[in-house]
Image: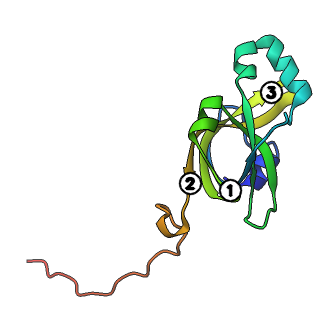
Amino acid sequence: MTIEQLQAPRAAGLVKGQKVRVEGYFWQYLDYNPFMVPEYLELVRRPLAASRRRWAALYATSRMQGYYDRLALTPEQQRDWPVRRLEHVRIYGDLAQLPFGLLYLRAWYMQPLDEAQDPFPQRAPAAAVQGRQRRQP
């Protein structure tokens, strides 16, 4: 999954409840609410869930392209996940929905990615090793 797909979830065929994994560059925890009107409507229906939601922003690239400000976390996650600006991270979560059909990414886990220690590097597949075949008795 990419940030570009999250920016246009309907065009990418994404649906509510879908589990996702996306990589990006953390920008900041937001002091503003990117969904003020839909969030107020959600607050009426589910006051505890909506009031505990915190927002954060990601960029698709380290050159600050592809801004995405629909990453939702809990206050506990925000406290437990100290992340630097433009740190490369992998987010695991699911897509949730606000009124008016707006989808956002609800984070379950954030994994900082150090390029040197990335457990899932994006490498080309290794070439097949040529060797002798075993003789069958």
Q: Is residue 44 above or below residue 9?
A: above
Residue at point 81% right, 16% down? 43
x and y percent of residue 23 in the render?
Answer: 64, 55
Query: In the rendered structure, which disc, 1 or 3, sits on the residue that comes first in sequence?
Result: 1
Q: Is residue 40 above or below residue 72?
A: above
| Label 1 vs label 2, nearer the camera | 2
x and y percent of residue 46 in the render?
Answer: 75, 14
| Label 2 vs label 3, nearer the camera | 2
Q: Secondary structure at mark 2?
A: strand
Q: Is residue 2 above or below residue 80?
A: below
Residue 11: mark in rendering: none
Residues packed near mark 1 inside 10 Å, few (<14), some (14 to 19) or many (20 plus): many
Residue at point 70% right, 23% down? 52
Residue 24: mark in rendering: 1
The residue pinned by badge 2 equals 112
Q: Amino acid at mark 3?
A: Leu
Could you say which is closer to the camera, residue 123 or residue 132?
A: 123
Q: CA distance from mark 1 to mark 3?
A: 23 Å
Q: Amino acid at mark 1?
A: Gly
Q: Secondary structure at mark 1?
A: strand
Residue at point 50% right, 63% down? 118
Query: In the rendered structure, which disc, 2 or 3, sits on the residue that comes first in sequence?
Result: 3
Q: CA distance from mark 2 to mark 3?
A: 28 Å
The residue pinned by badge 3 equals 98
